[in-house]
Amino acid sequence: MPLSSILATVDLGSNSFRVQICAVENGQLRVIDSLKEMVRFAGGLDENKNITTDAQERALECLSRFGQRLQGLQTEQVRVVATNTFRVAKNIQDFLPKAEAALGFPIQIIAGREEARLIYLGVKHTQPPTTQNMLVVDIGGGSTEFVIGSDLQPDIMESLPLGCVSYSTRFFPDGKITAERFEQAVASARIEIQRISQDLKQHGWDFAIGSSGSARSIRDVIDAYKLSKHDLDVASMRMIAKKVINAGSTRKAKLLGMKSDRIEVFAGGLAVMVAVFEELNLDAMSVTDAALRDGVFFDMMGRDLERDLRDETVELFQSLYHVDVAQANRVKQIAKQCFAGLSQSLPNSQLQIWNEYLDWAASLHEVGMSIAHSGYHKHSAYILDHADMFGFSRQEQHLLAVLVLSHRGDIKKLVDVVTDEQWWPAVFAMRLAALFCRSRKDLIFPDNTSLYYDAASKTCVLQISAQWLQDNPLIAGSLAQEVLQWHHIQSELKIEAITP
């Protein structure tokens, strides 16, 4: 089969790391390979929420093996998502470059609600068509996602910090399970769920589905003992809990249907699931084999075969924040023209990606005006950094925020914000585009205009008609001020006025 028809996802969960490789045939996915390792990454969080050296080494060894399997695939064929432990670990920024180097692909740390959306997307695509509301509950290693919806775009998405690894570590650290410890775990999870239970109940659902390893492992045990006609119900789960408590540990209970790799985290996941049922007054729940990685695949196929969800999100934000679309399009056009001259030092493989970032940043650079005109670029950056932007990873949102923050104001603020030298051409393109479009009128550069950027010296040379500058005094004055701004960061903007 052609290599171009291959897609791969890597799911870096708090309990296990997984890679799945699929062939796309006539719009359908066919799994051709998968790897899974129980890294127990959440178990490597110390009391200060730092990932321990041992946990980092386990993860890097696993990622190196995954990277070898993914060799030959291009960046656009592989999507890597990291979840709760990557979100909460305080030293994750020190670990992330090592992880990306070991794997050979960029890692996207996705927000809890984005994780919820992707899980729902995977479940929705694998369910029979229905217009009924579906509640999806996914108990992961470090977080649990709750989603309600009937269409491809869900109505409610929530993520809570409770998972099978974190709860097993917290309430059963030595593996011993008593009735008191188990009820403490259930009560703690119920308190967390109470934060969202009212909203979930008010919206309502017609049926519930559980995904992830915890739901599947509980289902398998219930089925092995033939405890219920349902995949999951609270009476059956309480019976299993009693078996484990009477034995003193999950390992000693020797539960039928239990896979060996779930033993250490089973009790934590069971306590969370019991809490879900009791807090939400659930009677029964079916279990699906669909998971986060399936949602990531369908999301990738949506980007390749239909429309990029990120484009839809940008349009939604333009409408939500009453963006002047005509002005956004002007800035977008000029930013791309400027970037064409400024990006000569970037590798060709990066050009398309950066043009997409510029497109989105220019489209959204004025969203902050809905808050206030004064300092609107700061408001815009804050919105893009912190809002739920479906389809975007946290890193992508932060990059857009930096580009938007950079388009006006004191350039010195960017010294500590721009963390990668490859960002500067796009930053300068945004600044120049906003400057040229300040009059909010369509703009055409004279034919002999050229722009060049030398990355080594951080020097930009703009050659432009002297007569055109004379005819556009606002732009000419702004360029003179911009020259001074660049000096503040040991860079240089040279304006060479061309005469016939």
Image (cartoon, grey):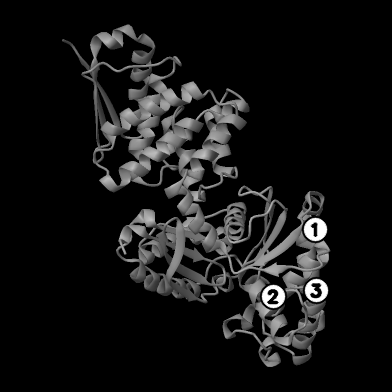
Q: CA distance from mark 3 to mark 2?
A: 15 Å
Residue 385, image quadrant: top right
Describe the element under mark 1 as helix, strand or loop.
Answer: helix
Describe the element under mark 2 as helix, strand or loop.
Answer: helix
Q: Quadrant of the N terminus?
A: bottom left
Q: Could one spot residue 91 in this view of the protein?
A: yes
Q: Circle 2 is placed at which residue position?
A: 268
Q: Position of residue 197 (x, y in %)?
A: 79, 56
Describe the element under mark 3 as helix, strand or loop.
Answer: helix
Q: Position of residue 358 (x, y in %)?
A: 41, 36
**For marks 1 and 2 on the same chain, the one whose residue lies earlier in the sequence:** 1
Q: Amino acid at mark 1?
A: Gln
**For marks 3 and 1 on the same chain, the one whose residue lies earlier in the sequence:** 1
For marks 3 and 2, give the one nearer the viewer: 3
Q: Amino acid at mark 3?
A: Val
> Pointer 1: residues within 10 angstroms few (<14), some, or many (20+)?
some
Report the disc number at residue 234: 3
Q: Position of residue 155 (x, y in %)?
A: 69, 47
Report the disc number at residue 194: 1
In the displayed image of the protein, which residue is found farthest to the left? 500
Q: Are marks 3 and 1 in contact (CB under 8 Å)?
A: no
**For marks 3 and 2 on the same chain, the one whose residue lies earlier in the sequence:** 3
Q: Are marks 1 and 2 in contact (CB under 8 Å)?
A: no
- Seen in the picture, residue 323 relative to 424 is either above or below; the reply is above
- Seen in the picture, residue 323 relative to 70 is either above or below; the reply is above
Q: CA distance from mark 1 to mark 2?
A: 18 Å
Residue 271, image quadrant: bottom right
